[in-house]
Image (spheres, helix red, strand yellow):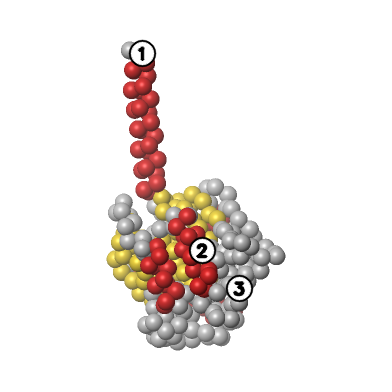
Amino acid sequence: MNLLKNLKFTSIVFSIILSFETSYAQQSHRIATFNIRFDNPGDEGNLWKDRAPHVSSLIQFHQVGLLGTQEGLQHQIQELSTALDFEYLGVGRDNGAEKGEFTAIIFDPKKYNLLDQGTFWLSPTPEKPSKGWDAALNRICSWGKFKSQEDQTFYVFNSHYDHIGQQAREESSKLIIKKIEEINTEELPVILLGDFNVTPDNPAYTIITDSEDWQDARLISEIPAYGPGGTFTGFDWEKMPRGIIDHIFIKGDIQVIRHGILTDNYGKKYPSDHFPVLVEIEF
């Protein structure tokens, strides 16, 4: 009789623990930023056709539900979406349609419902395809308004700053902060992620972190941030990168559980020339 009672008690405790863990898993969100490197036929030894399965496997293994990508061309984004059974938003930076690199946001439609979306150019004329200030190339920011299964509504903005123009990078930060304020009239939680092409000592970074209520997720992670001190590898296996240029910023009622720069590799090769950056958060 005592054995039966103990078994029943153990079963109840196990059910409570399982219920708690399930609830916790449902409430947390794994979000990442990943410069996947454009499909460059000159990347001998690191061609997209060889890297693509490893990019999608990495996303699946780390159970990323929402991913901001940079540099991906339309066919790359479509391939990833198909492999993951995800949906995506975004346009090409050259013509606002399919031409040029995307800052696409790829997401699991079973976890997130897309409510609204848009793209603007990082220039004085953000409403149309254009190059801004001293930038070498057209640069864009794509965004989505999402609702989770738990009925939490939030915004994600994803961008890729210019690699040449310092003025363009600083002005891009000012523009993005301004546009987020214009779009997010409900003052919902916001996640800003991307390849910013600047380290934390650059004014283009501090313009964001000095803005009201904005924080770098890496610096407020409950579990100390994990990974190397850099995110751009250049496909170079022989040395670890220095300088974090891929960032995730947050604003609003968001708790950062963990932050990691992921160094996954295969046969001494990396899936991309950037490491992806992952956060797990709760609203």
For residue 144, above or below residue 217 = below
- Asked whether residue 83 is in view, the answer is yes
The residue labelled by disc 1 is 2
- The type of residue carrying mark 1 is Asn
Going from N to C along the chain, the mark reached first, 2 or 3, is 3
- The type of residue carrying mark 3 is Gly
Q: Residue at x 48, y 84 (%)?
A: 138
Q: Which of the two residues, 135 or 237, is positioned nearer the viewer here?
A: 237
The residue labelled by disc 3 is 45
Q: Residue furthest top?
A: 1
- Distance between the alpha carbons at the discs numbered 2 and 3: 14 Å
| Mark 2, other Cα within 10 Å: few <14 / some 14–19 / many ≥20 | some
**Residue 54 marker:** 2
Image quadrant of residue 119?
bottom left
Q: Residue at x 33, y 12 (%)?
A: 1
Going from N to C along the chain, the mark reached first, 3 or 1, is 1
**Residue 34 position within the rendered picture, expressed as x and y whole percent measured from the top left:** 50, 66
Q: Is residue 120 shown left or right of residue 163?
A: left
Q: Is residue 130 shown left or right of residue 259?
A: left
Image quadrant of residue 98?
bottom left
Q: Which of the two residues, 192 or 230, is positioned nearer the viewer here?
A: 230
Q: Which of the two residues, 146 or 255, is positioned nearer the viewer here?
A: 146
- Distance between the alpha carbons at the discs numbered 3 and 1: 66 Å
**Residue 276 position within the rendered picture, expressed as x and y whole percent measured from the top left:** 53, 63
**Residue 261 position within the rendered picture, expressed as x and y whole percent measured from the top left:** 57, 58
- Asked whether residue 193 is in view, the answer is no
**Mark 3 secondary-structure assignment:** loop
